[in-house]
Image (cartoon, rainbow, N blue to C red):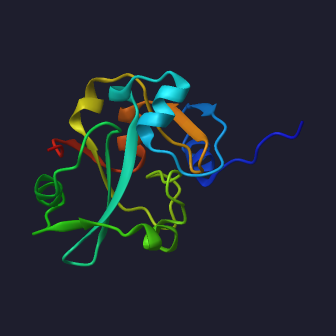
Amino acid sequence: MAKEAKTNAMRFLEKNKISYEERSYECDEFVDGITTATKLGQPLDETFKTLVAHGKTGAYYCFLIPVDKELDLKKAAKSVGEKSVELLHVKDLTAVTGYVRGGCTPIGMKKQFMTVIHNSAEQLLQFYISGGRVGLQIRLSPAALVSAVRGKFDDILL
């Protein structure tokens, strides 16, 4: 059986010498993060989704939050120094990030955007994020991810 091709996210992690673990699941189309976490037996508070937003300035941002939580757009805007941010429309996701819905991750995008991870991840040794395609999760250190993408932890939940 042929080994699955590496994603841009995996190549980025390997280039930056960040250890990670792959977890795959059968999936033909987008499923939400709660379904993914449940399917893989991952704790919801350790499984994060990537949301991409744009601010009034036109800049793009990545926000990582637990899959069962909601982003507070006002807190998110304040965190990145914008007056307001709004989530990117799904139809624009691939053009902006290079990733599809359900496979979007803050690493290995076409361009590195400022990344804010909810501060609950700061206490975790490992967490799960998308691996860069639908059906693939990556387990890694939140601290290593923040360092690699020059991001930060902040309170961005409702």
Q: Which residue is drawn at 15% across and 61% down?
A: 77
Q: Residue at x 44, y 73 (%)?
A: 92
* Quarter of the C terminus within the rendering: top left
Q: In this view, does 91 lie to the left or right of 88?
A: right
Q: Residue at x 67, y 37 (%)?
A: 26
Residue 66: % across, % down? 32, 37
97 to 31, vertically: above or below: below
108 to 117, vertically: above or below: below
Which corner quadrant of the image does residue 3 belong to?
Answer: top right
Residue 64: % across, % down? 33, 46
Residue 79: % across, % down? 15, 54
Label count reads 0
126 to 86, vertically: above or below: above
Which corner quadrant of the image does residue 114 belong to?
Answer: bottom left
- Closer to the camera in the image, 29 or 148: 29
* Quarter of the N terminus within the rendering: top right
Tell me if residue 49 can be seen. Answer: yes
Q: In the image as oriented, which residue stretches furthest toward the right? A: 1
Tell me if residue 18 can be seen. Answer: no
Q: Is residue 104 left or right of residue 47?
A: right
114 to 2, vertically: above or below: below
Q: Is residue 128 left or right of residue 58?
A: right
Residue 76: % across, % down? 18, 55
